[in-house]
Image (cartoon, rainbow, N blue to C red):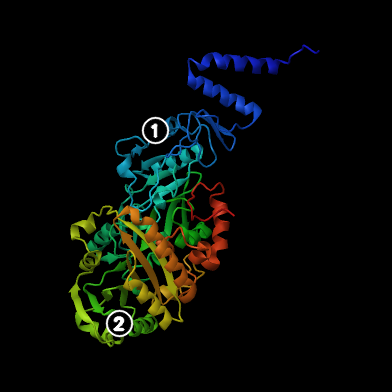
Amino acid sequence: MNTRISTSKLLLVFLVIYGELLLSHNNVKASYLEARLAHRRGPLKKRGNQICSNSGVTCSGSNPCCSQFGWCGAGDGYCGTGCNPSATPSNLKKCLTGTTGKAVFPGDAEYAADIVDENNRVTYSPAALVYASDIADVQKAVKCAATSKLNVAPRSGGHSYESYSLGGKDGALVIDLGGLNQITIDDAAKTARIGAGSKLGPIYYTLSQSGYMIPGGSCPGVGISGFALGGGYGLYSRKFGLAVDNILSIDIVNADGDLITASSTKNSDLFFALRGAGGGSYGVVTSFKFKITPVQTQVTSFQYKWPVGAAKTLIPAIEKYATQGTDDVTLSLVWDNSGLLIQGVYLGQQSGLSNALSDILAVSGYNQVSVQQQTFFDSVVFFSGQSASFVQNPTITPYIFKAKSLYVDSSGLSAAGIDALNNYLASPPCHTYAILDLYGGAINRVAPNAMAFVHRDPLYGIQLMSDWQDASQKTKCVNNINSFGDSFQSRYTSPYSYQNYIDRDLNNWQNAYYGANYRKLVTTKAKYDKNNLFAFPQSIPTS
């Protein structure tokens, strides 16, 4: 018998014996030893509570392998994208040392409050949150995320319908942009530099104080980044276009941590992609340059309500208005089992409103709920449903909801479709309503291939919204609105949906959100983020 033993075998025997001796004294060292042995003999399956393996990285002392925060229990591994064994909480903290803004980690006193976003239906547990106070903080956080193989989730206002501003899964690095909220106006150029963490309410207020505006939405707490990068529909869009149509350039921190500019003349392929598909897929936007428009001195806000029985007459009148009505009116219709409420803004004096809305007001049976001539900013406050002070300093107002988005094209909604929606809204199992947002005007005069935002042909969008207070109703309410929304879309509307009302349950979302532009967006993603650092469940992929 050959009694010669190789040096490597002797070392292996020694390590095993040494490990057994240490086990009773130091479980951490024993676990580490087994991890080293695993490297020699291949990945180990989980054995008791000691070892588990993920993509070749052995994690010690965790049960299960990944904790709710993504960290690999008490061991040295991180079971996130890439399974980087160096990405421990302590190492990430060390990497983030020197940021001006604070970093918050699981276990910190403020962590639970800091991961609350607008939609309480879904939440995630980030590996950390970095509150950027300047561009350098953003750059450092992106580089630390890349080193630790953590996906980056930019958060502007925290209003993502699926809480993607928390990463869309556990273990992301959230970069909160609330500190990047500076607004600088260039009167000569009629432009404004707006920080990526600015909210719509303060933007409206600041610009209007200098006599300007950009077309925004009605919710003052929505962040400009998510809003504008996904399109940005609002009460002034038929006259001035979507928010995305008014972007002149974008400053963005890319996957290498470099600050670059995207415009029609610099990184134009990225500029194309960001305008409609830029929410979290290509980098962290730090600021926008917007074209700004002088505000109308006086505008007229209005609300009229019809009974539900008027739907078959009122909906065709709205559809006709989309193509033939004045651009000076942008309106929405709120439809539930109490009736149909039309509300909007006329960019003119109250005396001209009846003529501007004549085709719609020809539908009999309405009650005039409210007609007010007011300043532009007062109209913003009115449609926010909040106080002026709240609009200027908005906060998160969490609730539980689920939404579906649909588009009605030039063929309109059939009588059968109107009946189907009316019947559904008459007695839904959960509180549910529909909002019809009128398109046409400046929105539809932009070509579908001019930028990533492809929805330039609809008469209007439909948002189905269901909300509830009892968390135990989640499954019932979500399943119900998903079932109806999917069926209704397949039978009565176009196959497209609005990406700002993002829906994790949407079938074929790639086509629904981006249509014929999708493949171009994938090519751009592969160029600017080949390692998919900026990723969430419905982000643009690299292939």
Q: Is residue 440 visible?
A: no
Q: Amino acid at mark 2?
A: Gly
Q: Position of residue 361 (x, y in %)?
A: 27, 85
Q: Locate residue 103: give its quadrant.
A: top left
Asked whether the beta carbons under mark 2 and mark 1 sit within 8 Å of each other, the answer is no
Task: Please state the total of marks drawn on the protein image.
Answer: 2
- Closer-to-camera residue (150/427): 427
* Residue 175: assigned label: none
Question: Residue 338, relative to residue 415: is it above or below?
Answer: above
Question: Residue 327, relative to residue 109: is it above or below?
Answer: below
Q: Is residue 45 visible?
A: yes
Tell me which label, 2 or 1, sits earlier in the chain: 1
What element does badge 2 sit on?
A: helix
Q: Residue at x 30, y 84 (%)?
A: 360
Identify the residue under disc 1: 97
Q: Locate residue 308: give its quadrant.
A: bottom left
What element does badge 1 sit on?
A: loop
Question: Residue 321, relative to residue 145: is it above or below?
Answer: below
The quadrant the C terminus occupies is bottom right
- Closer-to-camera residue (283/532): 532
Q: Amino acid at mark 1?
A: Thr
Q: State left or right for residue 372 relative to residue 290.
A: left
Q: Position of residue 115 (x, y in %)?
A: 34, 45
Question: Residue 265, relative to residue 148: is it above or below?
Answer: below
Q: Residue at x 42, y 30 (%)?
A: 90
Q: CA distance from mark 2 to mark 1?
A: 63 Å
* Residue 309: assigned label: 2
